[in-house]
Image (cartoon, grey):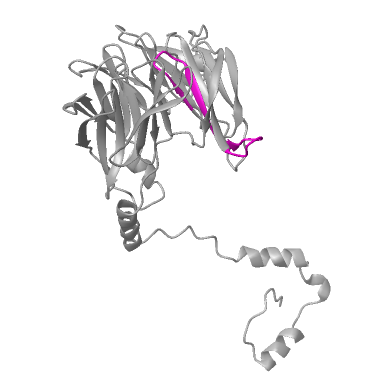
Amino acid sequence: MRVWLAVPLLSCSAAIALFACKSRPDESPPPIELARSALGTLPSARPPRPLSSDVVVFEKTVQADKLVPPARSGDCPLAFGKGVFGQLTKDALRVFDAVDFRLLGTEPLDEPRALLELADGALLAVGASTMLRWEPGKKRPTRLPRPMLLPRVRLYADAQQADLLWVFDDGLRVGGAAATATLASYRLTRSMAPEPRQMVPLPEQTLELTARGGGVLGPTREGVWLFLTPPMPNISSGELAGHVQRFSPGGLRLPGFTLAGRSPPTWVLPARRLDQSIWVEEAGTVSRVLVSPSYKHLFGLRLAGKVVAAASGDEGRVLAAVEVTGPGPRFELELLNQDLALVSRVVLAADEPTGADDWVHVVTQNQAVVVAAREPRIAVGGPERATIFDAEGRQLFFIPSN
């Protein structure tokens, strides 16, 4: 009789009998086969146990009352165009009439990530493998090939040319590595291939921004690019100083200036005057600054809460900020005019935390904000809903997900 595994708690007589009955050594299996046989008897790995309902309830309470969601980091899924309003759902582009908000059309789009208004008022929806351009007066969009886009890049429409897309890469990488920040332009041309995804557009030009791993980009109302870098020690004085690089709408380098002792804001937004800019910080402050020909802080104020999303529009007359103003979390829309005077505060619809790791995405995905470029219209929402307001904070329309 062969004995493959030792049996625990044997008596002395049983042990002697087992050794006496042991087969000849040449008939025993090799050690490797014995190990394989033993391993084969082990139970398979169990899946992780789901959190108990009590733990989930506790986590939801902590997320609702104690934790504040950070600023949204992705591109906006909402946009106003010329006579239209667009919304990206989880798998499609929906376009509405901007007057009565009747649905004009729905186009499938794989993994939507950004929606922009181009200089001619057309909408550009960017998906995982293709782009949709919905031009004013058209009933269907044109499919365009999409350039290669890293997950962290931000997309901007050119302020003057309707067929130009800008891609900003801040140079930050996973794991702490850093590369030079870049701003690249792509020409929006119609594909001659049967399937647009077969072609990958190449950048028309690439601007290397003199900073490694970090920086904030934003345009002025006329399309001048401002790139703000984090403070670094000055070689001669040892003081911390940031820097602002300036580029023309076409990409020509303009004179920059130094920011003594100041960190870059979270958002750099167009102001009413072409030589000024609106800077909004996640912590809840907003400033109007002079950015041409030199830097000067003109005015600043404290907002009602911590900012999750911010945008400006109506040719710089409206500043809109979505803020966390209380537990829940409680979201409010705060509207300011071109002089940064308070116009209105509106409590927004909110989603409850999940008690899981995805709670930040859940509570912020429908809190994006956009302001029409040339009209007093504001939209707050995301893939599941959108609410349209006027410049006074009055609700004009509500769009559910279906």
Residue 311 shows up from this direction: yes
Q: Residue at x 55, y 61 (%)?
A: 44
Q: Give percent across and percent down for residue 291.
A: 45, 21
**Is residue 241 shown in magenta?**
no
| Quadrant placement of the N terminus | bottom right
Residue 90 shows up from this direction: no
Q: In the figure, is residue 4 to the left or right of 127?
A: right
Q: Quadrant of residue 35?
A: bottom right
Q: Residue at x 59, y 19 (%)?
A: 207
Q: Give percent across and percent down for residue 382.
A: 32, 31
Q: Quadrant of residue 113?
A: top left
Q: In the figure, is residue 290 to the left or right of 320?
A: right
Q: Give percent across and percent down for residue 377.
A: 24, 21
**Is residue 236 shown in magenta?**
yes
Farthest residue toward the bottom? 13
Q: Residue at x 41, y 30 (%)?
A: 267
Between 17 and 44, the one nearer to me in the picture = 44
